[in-house]
Image (cartoon, helix red, strand yellow):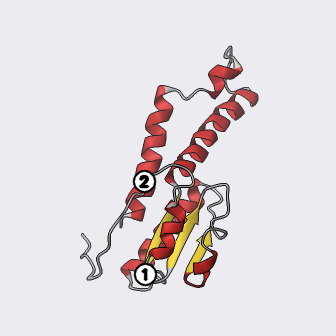
Amino acid sequence: MKKLGDKTGSCFLTYGDYGFGKTYGLSTLPGKTWIVVTEPRDPRQVLAHALDHMEFTIPESFNDLMDSLNKWNELAQDGKFPFDNVALDSASFLMALYRLQIQDDRFDERISGKKIVTESLLEIGMMQDRDWGVLSGIMQRVTQLLNR
């Protein structure tokens, strides 16, 4: 077991329509903020007035994101994490990217001949019941690491 550190934090989920101001709200966080960007638009345009206390990264893959979050958690446990806040912009887009990756993996399996396919393109693109469990597990892991 690990002893909890002295520093505590909070986790917030901000939900709203596109253009509601969720990203802009990140500029109100005190201290230095690390923003993990998964949206197709560049948040630096909305946050131009606050760039001096923000750093932005774009994960290149699921493994890249998980490795980064684990690394930052280790630094935080050692008291060496260089940020006061971490923001994921946004969970919705991240989940959509992973959903597309699952579909791409199924398509690659079909192309490589590992699977005999009689499915239509629509069936290949549809999420199967087992995919939702995988996707749920992936998002759960990301959320757990963000909440440490």
Q: Which residue occupies the extreme front position in the image?
A: 20
Any mark on residue 141, and which? 2
Name the quarter where the C terminus is drawn.
bottom left
Q: Viewed as shown, does residue 135 lie left or right of 3?
A: right
Q: Is residue 73 above or below residue 7?
A: above
- Three-letter residue code for mark 2: Arg
Name the quarter where the N terminus is drawn.
bottom left
- Three-letter residue code for mark 1: Pro
Q: Marks 2 and 1: in contact by CB < 8 Å? A: no
Q: Is residue 64 above or below residue 2?
A: above
Name which of mark 1 and mark 2 comes first in the sequence: 1
Any mark on residue 83, and which? none
Q: CA distance from mark 1 to mark 2?
A: 26 Å
10 Å neighbourhood of mark 2: few (<14), some, or many (≥20)? Answer: few
Residue 141: x and y, percent?
A: 42, 54
Residue 44: x and y, percent?
A: 65, 70
| Front one among 21 and 87 | 21
Residue 138: x and y, percent?
A: 47, 48
| Front one among 45 and 129 | 45
Say which residue label 1 marks: 30
Which of discs 1 and 2 lies nearer the camera? The answer is 1
For the point 24% across and 76% down, the residue is: 3
Q: Which residue occupies the extreme top position in the image?
A: 118
For the point 26% across and 73% down, the residue is: 2
For the point 42% across and 72% down, the residue is: 73
| Front one among 20 and 55 | 20
10 Å neighbourhood of mark 1: few (<14), some, or many (≥20)? Answer: few
Q: Is residue 86 above or below residue 75?
A: above
For the point 55% across and 29% down, the residue is: 127
Q: Viewed as shown, does residue 91 lie left or right of 9?
A: right
Q: Is residue 82 above or below residue 26?
A: below
